[in-house]
Amino acid sequence: MFDKIKDVYQLQKMAKELKKELKNTHIEAEVDGVIVIVDGEQEVISITWAEGAESNPKKLQENIVKASNKGIKKAQQIAAEKMKPLMSGMNMPNLPAEEKK
């Protein structure tokens, strides 16, 4: 019984550390001179673009969306990779087992 409580505590501690690590992980995504920086928690940190890009507002907007989506997708991939060890330590019977590669 106490072993299970200890295991849950360890998982909570690992999850907290992972969350902090993800918050401090910055991912840069670039599309046609638009650079978006996203943290590992998928929050946009900054958006910059090349000089003159604002001359075509519609294209600038499209590139901001594309770069943001690209950064968020990469952040999701990084978070999933970092969570694998944490998730393997949990017994979650309602979730399908991960396929062996």
Image (cartoon, helix red, strand yellow):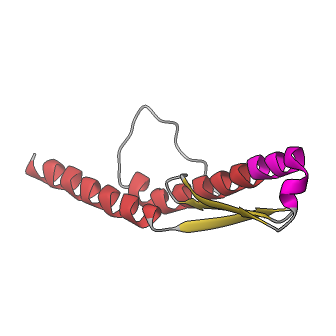
Q: Measured from the top left, where is residue 80 in percent x and y?
A: 54, 55
- Residue depicted at 82% across the width and 52% down the height: 63
Residue sticking out furthest to the top: 94
Report the quarter where the N terminus lies: top left
Report which quarter residue 46 is drawn in: bottom right
Q: Horizontal placement of 61 versus 24: left or right?
A: right
Main secondary structure found in the magenta portion:
helix
Report the quarter where the C terminus lies: bottom right
Q: Horizontal placement of 4 versus 33: left or right?
A: left
Q: Measured from the top left, where is residue 4 in percent x and y?
A: 17, 48
- Residue depicted at 52% across the width and 59% down the height: 40
Q: Measured from the top left, where is residue 82 in percent x and y?
A: 49, 62
Q: Measured from the top left, where is residue 89 in percent x and y?
A: 36, 55
- Residue depicted at 84% across the width and 55% down the height: 54
61 or 11, which lies in front?
61
Q: Is residue 11 magenta?
A: no
2 or 32, which lies in front?
32
53 or 67, which lies in front?
53
- Identify the magenta region: 53-66
Q: How many marks?
A: 0
Report which quarter residue 21 is drawn in: bottom left
- Residue depicted at 45% across the width and 68% down the height: 24
